[in-house]
Image (spheres, rainbow, N blue to C red):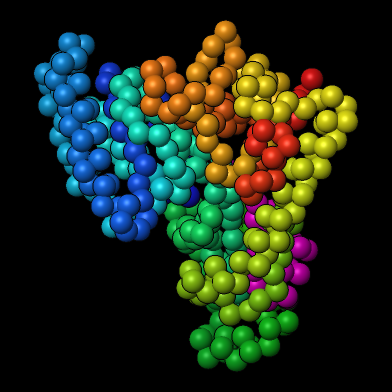
């Protein structure tokens, strides 16, 4: 699975306590040669480490040990290193396993606990800035979920919604030629109301920026009769997308997504400047970590490739070489997860945008 598929309900299920041991295998992967040659060896070694620890852990029963070993083997068989991204997560517990591919680098580690290690997954999804795309035509509305360069049609959330005409096919085909009158037809308006209502349920369960694409007449009707579509960050008048391929939809929405991303960066930096003016700004990983831990952060902004290994010393974060004892390699991702858990917004900006704030900053609530 990919981080774009992480929804609030999926995340809640991943965070559910398991019977010990819930094993998380985390490793960086590589997209191209020659670096990707090391990935199979690294995966084999990490899984071997997990199995060795299972064997030595007296808290694990024989039945659970055999079960989790089998789950790890099944997970490894599902890993696709040929199409690897930047990180890989394997979750295994008695009776279950999952494999996640991430477009974000992760530290190498094997963790035994009563819950899965989700912070890297949460941070990767936040960095990818997930969004929804609704395409509408005279007879069909489809929903697509996007995150970073990925886009896929969402067919498990009540979509697609299609018109169910009462008219004979011949008469219907003749009428479709007149687009404005088609969208004034009550059957079509009813189907668009249904699409809008279905969309509202999706946005309530999984809020994301929304882009609506379709004929100008369809967009006008949605504005008139609906509510959910009005929340779109952008509407793109473009016909011919009722049954369009994922590639065609991706191309059609790309410009609007890029513009929204640029606006989000500007708005985030403006909020940081305003916070600095009223002394409500935390800058640098140590200050941000403390403000997030206290639940004081309203907005956390960080550079998209920021990563810094640290050691906790006297309740402060001190930069330290990766791989040394007691060094936290994934503290940045931990900050992101904790910020989201406390209701803060998290925004990622391009590298270099926060050079003056230590590459990470937060707007404080108080």
Q: Position of residue 154 (x, y in %)?
A: 47, 57
Direction from residue 66 to residue 107 in the image, left or right? right
On whether residue 218 falls in the magenta region, the answer is yes
Numbered-mark total: 0
Image quarter (top left, top right, bottom left or bottom right) of the C terminus:
top right
Residue 56 is drawn in which quadrant?
A: top left
Q: Position of residue 92 (x, y in %)?
A: 27, 32
> Would residue 299 be seen by someone viewing this image from the given angle?
no
On whether residue 334 falls in the magenta region, the answer is no
In the image, the segment drawn in magenta is 205-228
Q: Position of residue 229 (x, y in %)?
A: 69, 58
For the residue pair 302 and 135, the one nearer the viewer reads as 302
294 versus 25 height, above or below: above
Residue 326 is drawn in which quadrant?
A: top left
**Which residue is at 21% across, 28% downward?**
49
271 versus 235 height, above or below: above
**Which residue is at 33% across, 20% downward?**
113
Q: Residue furthest front?
A: 321
For the residue pair 282 and 97, the one nearer the viewer reads as 282
339 versus 313 height, above or below: below
Q: Position of residue 357 (x, y in %)?
A: 71, 34
**Which residue is at 44% across, 21% downward?**
327
**Which residue is at 15% across, 34% downward?**
70
13 versus 154 height, above or below: above
Q: Residue furthest top?
A: 314
> Would residue 16 be seen by someone viewing this image from the given angle?
yes
């Amino acid at each position: 699975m990919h981080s774009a598929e992480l929804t609030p309900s999926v995340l809640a299920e991943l965070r559910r306590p398991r019977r010990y041991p819930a094993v998380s295998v985390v490793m960086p992967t590589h997209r191209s040669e020659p670096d990707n040659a090391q990935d199979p060896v690294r995966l084999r070694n990490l899984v071997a480490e997990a199995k060795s620890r299972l064997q030595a852990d007296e808290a694990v029963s024989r039945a659970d040990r055999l079960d989790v070993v089998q789950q790890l083997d099944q997970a490894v068989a599902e890993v696709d290193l040929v199409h690897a991204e930047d990180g890989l997560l394997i979750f295994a517990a008695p009776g279950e396993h999952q494999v996640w591919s991430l477009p974000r680098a992760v530290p190498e580690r094997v963790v035994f606990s009563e819950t899965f290690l989700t912070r890297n997954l949460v941070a990767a999804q936040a960095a990818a800035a997930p969004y929804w795309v609704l395409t509408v035509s005279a007879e069909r509305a489809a929903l697509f979920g996007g995150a970073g360069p990925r886009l896929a049609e969402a067919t498990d959330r009540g979509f697609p919604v299609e018109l169910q005409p009462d008219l004979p096919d011949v008469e219907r085909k003749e009428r479709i030629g007149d687009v404005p009158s088609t969208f004034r037809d009550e059957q079509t308006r009813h189907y668009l109301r249904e699409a809008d209502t279905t969309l509202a349920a999706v946005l309530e369960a999984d809020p994301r920026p929304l882009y609506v694409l379709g004929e100008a007449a369809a967009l006008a009707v949605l504005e008139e009769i609906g509510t959910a579509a009005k929340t779109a960050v952008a509407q793109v008048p473009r016909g011919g997308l009722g049954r369009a391929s994922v590639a065609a939809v991706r191309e059609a929405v790309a410009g609007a997504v890029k513009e929204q991303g640029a606006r989000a960066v500007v708005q985030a930096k403006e909020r940081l400047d305003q916070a600095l003016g009223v002394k409500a700004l935390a800058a640098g990983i140590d200050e941000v970590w403390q403000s997030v831990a206290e639940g004081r952060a309203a907005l956390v902004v960080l550079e998209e490739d920021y990563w810094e290994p640290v050691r906790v010393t006297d309740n402060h974060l001190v930069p330290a070489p990766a791989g040394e004892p007691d060094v936290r390699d994934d503290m940045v991702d931990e900050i992101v997860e904790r910020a989201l858990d406390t209701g803060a917004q998290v925004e990622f900006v391009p590298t270099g945008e926060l050079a003056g704030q230590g590459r990470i900053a937060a707007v404080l609530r108080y």
